[in-house]
Image (cartoon, rainbow, N blue to C red):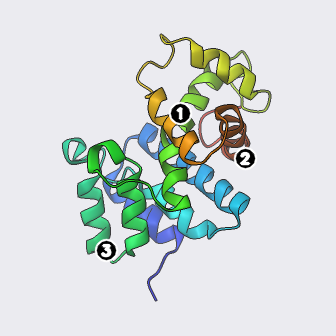
Amino acid sequence: MFDLSRERAYELLGLHNHDESHVKHALAVEAAMRYFARHFGEDEDLWGIVGLLHDLDWEECPEEHPKKGAEWLKEAGYPEEVIRGVLAHAWELTGVEPKSLMEKVIYAVDELTGFVIAVALVRPSRSLSDLTAKSVMKKWKDKAFAKGVNREVIEKGAQLLEMPLAELIEHVIEALRPIEQELGLG
């Protein structure tokens, strides 16, 4: 049986990621994935590892992302489910369409976690504790705000999940609240 422990995955992440912002992003996506796994009654550890490792290669090989990361995961013995999840999160780059529920969730939440954090950072409280989906939706409409976030991908992800965007945002806020200090918030 393959070791799907978080400790092993975090160690692998640390071998390839040294920039604090990349590690924080990995932690945010991991938290969102674990939250949604609980929400849907799925394997929290498996989903969490996909979230933690989805951008494994971003610092070292951005031009090959996420294909190089998928290769590294395969070499490390990770199961096909993890590798597909990593490839599906960047559907437009890899051609790996999100099919499973896990793949659809990572596709939907990857960029959304960053957007939610960006909204929290511009609030007086710099916290998720008082952040609402309504506040996030206000910023969503401001195309100059966090313009690097691909809103179309997030909207497409919400559609794949058959979930209204505001509901998806509310879930992501809820998912990130327990780790907001690790993310530099609160």
| 94 or 136, nearer to the observer | 94
Q: Residue type at mark 2?
A: Pro
Q: Residue type at mark 3?
A: Ala
Q: Would you identify the image quadrant in which residue 166 lies?
A: top right
Give the residue drawn at x 55%, y 35%: 112
Q: Are marks 3 and 1 in contact (CB under 8 Å)?
A: no
Q: Which mark is residue 155?
A: 1
**Residue 67, image x, y percentages:** 25, 55
Question: Seen in the image, is 121 located left or right of residue 84?
Answer: right
Question: Seen in the image, is 59 located left or right of residue 64?
Answer: right
Q: Which residue is mark 2?
A: 178
Q: Residue type at mark 1?
A: Glu
> Which type of secondary structure does the marked residue at label 2 adopt?
helix
Q: CA distance from mark 1 to mark 2?
A: 25 Å
Which residue extends farthest bottom? 1
Q: Is residue 96 positioned above or below 58 on the image?
A: below
